[in-house]
């Protein structure tokens, strides 16, 4: 009977059973390190944010300018080459002035971004890039607008393209008057829409085109051409090519455009009426000129 109530033998108790394993101790140490790194990262983030706020203020820009000035004083790299590409209508001197630096100056003594913004403000410039190339070169690449004429309307001057659309939001003023010497000037309502046709036509007659100062649209129907000597050439509606061809012959034979004339009226196909600039006696018309023979 006593054998029934005998206790079964139990497994021996491991005296190290409650001790954590080496792997568990390793991860506990790693968690402590990661916790410290997280706190350090948060502190760095907050410091970086505060620095960014300070940099975005004017004080930050002044600090950058001061640092650039100090570096330029120590900079042994001097500008030896300035390369400009893409320029056709813009004067090189205008780009150099907008660049704000020159040869034999420090390569790092100016702001590339500020120089680019100044170049972009030039009348013909659509977009520009300014780059430093070590050890001594500045590369400037410009993309110009493609205007064909300057349109004057109600006292305002703007650049227009072949379709007559405005290609520059910047109005031309006396400050950039050099533009007026580069492109034809068209004047009047509707002149922008018909400018390409008359300019293309005039390109076929260089002797007339070289005397031209402005193209004036009359009643949105026809053209007057103001010559550089003050003579007004009155062209017929829809027959400009034939009239200019006749004038070309007269210019070759009589140098008509070099004479002091007030008007040359070519609105009639069979005659040319000329008004001298300083008529003698009473104002009267000169005898109609006979078109030259085609032989």
Image: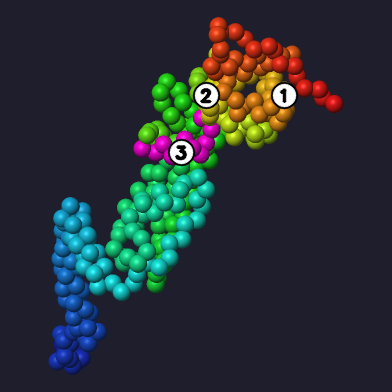
- Residue located 70% across and 31% down the image: 252
For label 1, count other residues whose C-alpha is less than 10 Å away and answer few (under 14), some (14-19) or many (20+).
some
In this view of the protein, which residue sits in the foreground, 164 or 9? 164
Answer with the quarter of the image where residue 100 lies.
Answer: bottom left
Mark 1 residue element = helix
Image: magenta residue range: 175-185
Relative to 139, is 68 on the left or the right?
Answer: left
Residue corresponding to mark 2: 230
Query: Label 2 neighbourhood size at 10 Å, few (<14), some (14-19), many (20+)?
Result: some
Instruction: Name the chief secondary structure element in magenta.
Output: helix
Q: Residue furthest right?
A: 295
Between the residue at mark 3 and the residue at mark 1, the CA separation in whole angstroms equals: 31 Å
The residue closer to the viewer here, 262 or 41, is 262
Q: Is residue 93 above or below residue 234?
A: below
Dividing the picture into quarters, in which one does residue 136 lie? bottom left
Q: Is residue 202 left or right of residue 121?
A: right
Which of discs 3 and 1 lies nearer the camera? The answer is: 1
- Placement of 85 over or under 270, stated as above or below: below
Q: Secondary structure at mark 2?
A: loop
Give the alpha-carbon distance from disc 1 to disc 2, as whole Å.
20 Å
Q: CA distance from mark 2 to mark 3?
A: 21 Å
| Residue 71 locus on image (x, y percent) | 24, 69
The residue labelled by disc 3 is 179
Please report contact status of discs 3 and 1: CB closer than 8 Å, yes or no: no
């Amino acid at each position: 009977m006593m054998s029934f109530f005998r206790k079964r033998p139990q497994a021996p108790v491991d005296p190290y059973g409650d001790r954590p394993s080496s792997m568990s101790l390793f991860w506990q140490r790693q968690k402590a390190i990661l916790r410290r790194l997280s706190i350090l990262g948060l502190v760095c983030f907050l410091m970086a944010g505060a620095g960014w706020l300070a940099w975005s203020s004017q004080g930050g820009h002044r600090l950058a300018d001061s640092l650039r000035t100090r570096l330029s004083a120590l900079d042994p790299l001097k500008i030896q080459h300035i390369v400009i590409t893409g320029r056709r209508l813009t004067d090189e001197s205008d780009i150099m002035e907008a660049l704000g630096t020159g040869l034999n100056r420090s390569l790092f003594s100016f702001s590339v971004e500020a120089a680019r913004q100044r170049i972009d403000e030039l009348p013909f410039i659509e977009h520009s890039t300014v780059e430093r190339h070590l050890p001594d070169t500045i590369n400037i690449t410009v993309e110009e607008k493609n205007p064909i004429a300057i349109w004057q309307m109600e006292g305002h001057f703007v650049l227009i393209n072949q379709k007559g659309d405005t290609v520059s939001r910047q109005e031309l003023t006396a400050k950039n008057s050099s533009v007026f010497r580069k492109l034809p000037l068209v004047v009047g309502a509707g002149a922008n829409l018909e400018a390409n046709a008359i300019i293309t036509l005039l390109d076929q007659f260089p002797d007339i085109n070289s005397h031209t100062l402005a193209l004036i649209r009359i009643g949105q129907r026809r053209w007057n051409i103001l010559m550089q000597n003050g003579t007004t050439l009155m062209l017929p509606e829809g027959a400009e090519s034939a009239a200019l061809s006749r004038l070309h012959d007269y210019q070759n034979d009589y140098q008509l455009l070099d004479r002091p004339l007030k008007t040359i009226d070519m609105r009639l196909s069979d005659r040319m009426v000329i008004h001298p600039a300083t008529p003698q006696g009473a104002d009267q018309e000169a005898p109609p000129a006979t078109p030259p023979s085609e032989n």
